[in-house]
Structure formats: structure tokens, C-alpha cells
């Protein structure tokens, strides 16, 4: 597994390949399509991320000192966003996640190119991932 820094640099590099935001949105959509299947029976209210306009479910497990995430959303771009986040943070230690500033999101320009409601949802996703990590440090 690559380091957290390497994972974030790979995302920045992937996004830099596209000049237009329409192409970056297509990339996000493709990421969402590659998410592992999320079981319908796991789509429960306690797994919903609060603060997202779309419905986003996030589940996690702890193996040793590492957190593993799985997620789904009923909106295609939002599904890509959560896929991007868990692609970077799943398999990391709680301390790595809590200690990270998530600045790669700003570096790729994601937050500023989302609608205000999606931007709020992104903030909620980040806060939820951080919160899970903080509970398991």
C-alpha cells in the first residue's frame, strides 16, 4: 500500500490531467462506478452522513490499527466524491486520518467547483471520516 502522501499526490496528478471541469466530473463519476457494491441491507439511517443533500452511506471496520471504509450514494457525482475520499483514506490508521489536513481537496479545486449544497456535503463527508478516526485513535 502506498503512503497517505503518495495517495493524495496520485489524486492531484489524476485531476491535473484534465483541463476542463466537465472532464473532472466525468472522472469522479467513473470513480463512483468503480466502488464495491454496497449491500442494500446496510443502507440504514445510522450509516447516513448527516449534512449531505444526497443520501450517502458510510460504513467502516477496524482491522488491527487500520480503518477500512465502504460507501454508497444515490447521486452519481456524490458517489464519486465519497469514492475519492475512501480511496485515499481506507486502509489508513486512525492517527494518520486525524492528523491529515485533507488539503488535497483544495489543491484539486474540488470544493470551489461544487455547488454550495455539494460543497456542504463534501465537508460533512470529511467530518464523518475524521470523526470515525478520532473515535478509534
Image (cartoon, rainbow, N blue to C red):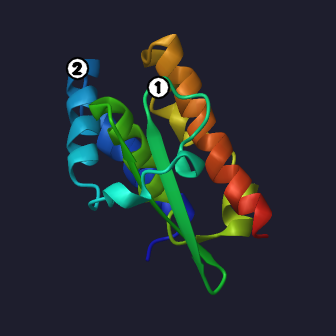
Residue depicted at 74% across the width and 57% down the height = 98
**What residue is disc 1 on?**
109
**What residue is disc 2 on?**
22
Looking at the picture, does residue 80 appear above or below residue 25?
A: below
Residue depicted at 56% across the width and 72% down the height = 61
Mark count: 2
Q: Can you tell which quarter of the image residue 70 is in?
A: bottom left
User: Relative to residue 97, is residue 115 drawn left or right?
Assistant: left
Looking at the picture, does residue 2 appear above or below residue 58?
A: below
The image quadrant where one finds the N terminus is bottom left
Of residue 38 and residue 29, the one placed in the foreground of this image is: 38
Residue 102 seen in render: no
What SS does tag 2 mark?
helix
Residue 69 seen in render: yes
- Expressed as whole percent of the image width and height from the top left, the position of residue 65 reads 66, 81
User: Relative to residue 98, is residue 1 drawn left or right?
Assistant: left
- Expressed as whole percent of the image width and height from the top left, the position of residue 34 reads 22, 54
Within 10 Å of disc 2 (Cα), the crowding (few <14, some 14-19, many 20+) is few
Is the C-beta separation of discs 1 and 2 under 8 Å? Answer: no
The image quadrant where one finds the C terminus is bottom right
- Expressed as whole percent of the image width and height from the top left, the position of residue 129 reads 62, 51
Amino acid at each position: 500500500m502506498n503512503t497517505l502522501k503518495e495517495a493524495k499526490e496520485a489524486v492531484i496528478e489524476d485531476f491535473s490531467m484534465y483541463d476542463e471541469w466537465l472532464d473532472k466530473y466525468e472522472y469522479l463519476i467513473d470513480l463512483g462506478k468503480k466502488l464495491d457494491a454496497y449491500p442494500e441491507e446496510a443502507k440504514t439511517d445510522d450509516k447516513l452522513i448527516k449534512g449531505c443533500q444526497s443520501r450517502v452511506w458510510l460504513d467502516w471496520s477496524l482491522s488491527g490499527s487500520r480503518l477500512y471504509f465502504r460507501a454508497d450514494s444515490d447521486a452519481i457525482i456524490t458517489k464519486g466524491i465519497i469514492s475519492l475520499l475512501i480511496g485515499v483514506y481506507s486502509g489508513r490508521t486512525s492517527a494518520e486520518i486525524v492528523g491529515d489536513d485533507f488539503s488535497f481537496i483544495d489543491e484539486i479545486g474540488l470544493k470551489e467547483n461544487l455547488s454550495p449544497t455539494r460543497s456542504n456535503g463534501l465537508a460533512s463527508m470529511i467530518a464523518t471520516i475524521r470523526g470515525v478516526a478520532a473515535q478509534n485513535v
